[in-house]
Image (cartoon, rainbow, N blue to C red):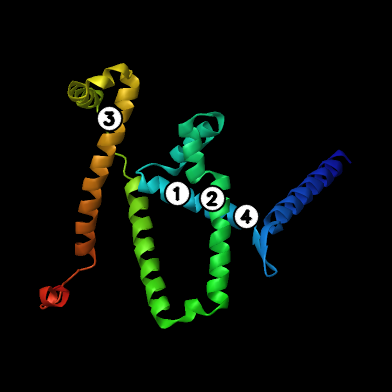
Amino acid sequence: MLRRQIKFFITVILLILVTLSVAAASKWIWRIDKKEVSVVRFEQDYNSFISMVAWQADMEPEQLKELILRAKSDQGEKGNALLNRVGRKAFASNYEDILLLHQDAVKTGYTEKEDVKAYLEFIEDYYAAQVYLMHIKSKFHPEFTEDELLEKWSKTVEENPEYEQITIDEGLKMMRSQMTKQKRVEFSKQFMKDLKKKYKFERSSDYEQQIAN
C-alpha cells in the first residue's frame, strides 16, 4: 500500500513538473502579427549575445555573467554602463527592434533580393567563422607559473608607478588576463596555419592578379 502511494505521489509530481516546463516553453514575451516569440527563445538569444560579447573580449561567458550580477548590486557608473550595454533590459529593447525590422524585411520581400541574399550569405559565413574562432580560443587555457606572473607584474609596476596602489593578488589577476590574451592570439595564428594544412588550402596561380586593386 505504501509503495503504491509513493509511486502515485511521484507520478503526480512528475506530471506537475512536465506541465510547468511545457507552460514555460509556450509562454510568449512578444507577438508580431500573431507570430509569438517565446520566453525560451528570448533566453536562448540573450545567452548567445552574452557569449558573443564575452568571446570578443577574450572572456568566458560565465565571467561576463558574473560581472553583470555584480553590476546589478553596484549603483555606480561602471555598473550602470555595463548593464546599459549588455543587461537584459538593454538587450530586450534592441531585440524588439531586431524582431520588427526582420519581420518587415521579410514581409516586404527585401530578403529575397539577389544582392541581399548574397550579402546575407557572406554575413552568415563571416559570423559563423568569427564565433567558431572565438569558441576555439576560449577553450585554450594557457598555464603560467607564479614566478612568471610576478615577473610580469614587477615590470608593469616599474613602467606604471600608479599601479603600486593595486594589491598583488589583483595585479596577478591582471597579468594572467593579459598574458592569456597574448597566448590566445598566438594560438589562433597557429590554429589557422594548421587548418590550411588540414584542408590542403591552395591559391590559384593568378591569385595576385585576381586580388590586385
On the picture, is 147 further left or further right than 34?
left
SS label for mark 3: helix
Other residues around mark 1 within 10 Å, as few (<14) / some (14–19) / many (≥20): many
- Going by the picture, which residue comes out furthest to the right? 1
Other residues around mark 2 within 10 Å, as few (<14) / some (14–19) / many (≥20): some
Q: Is residue 104 visible?
A: yes
Sequence-wise, the earlier of marks 1 and 2 is 1
Sequence-wise, the earlier of marks 4 and 3 is 4
| Residue at 48% in and 52% down | 49
Q: Nearer the viewer, residue 94 or 194?
A: 94
Label 3 belongs to which residue? Answer: 175
Label 4 belongs to which residue? Answer: 40
SS label for mark 1: helix
Position of the C terminus by quadrant: bottom left
Label 2 belongs to which residue? Answer: 91
On the picture, is 167 further left or further right than 70?
left
| Mark 2 or mark 3, whichever is nearer to me | 2
| Residue at 60% in and 57% down | 41
Sequence-wise, the earlier of marks 2 and 3 is 2
Mark pair 4, 3: CA separation: 38 Å
Quick check: 128 above or below 1? below
Kind of residue at disc 3 = Met
Q: Position of residue 155 (x, y in %)?
A: 18, 24
Quick check: 192 above or below 166? below
Quick check: 128 above or below 106? above
Other residues around mark 4 within 10 Å, as few (<14) / some (14–19) / many (≥20): some
On the picture, is 207 further left or further right than 9?
left
| Residue at 57% in and 52% down | 93
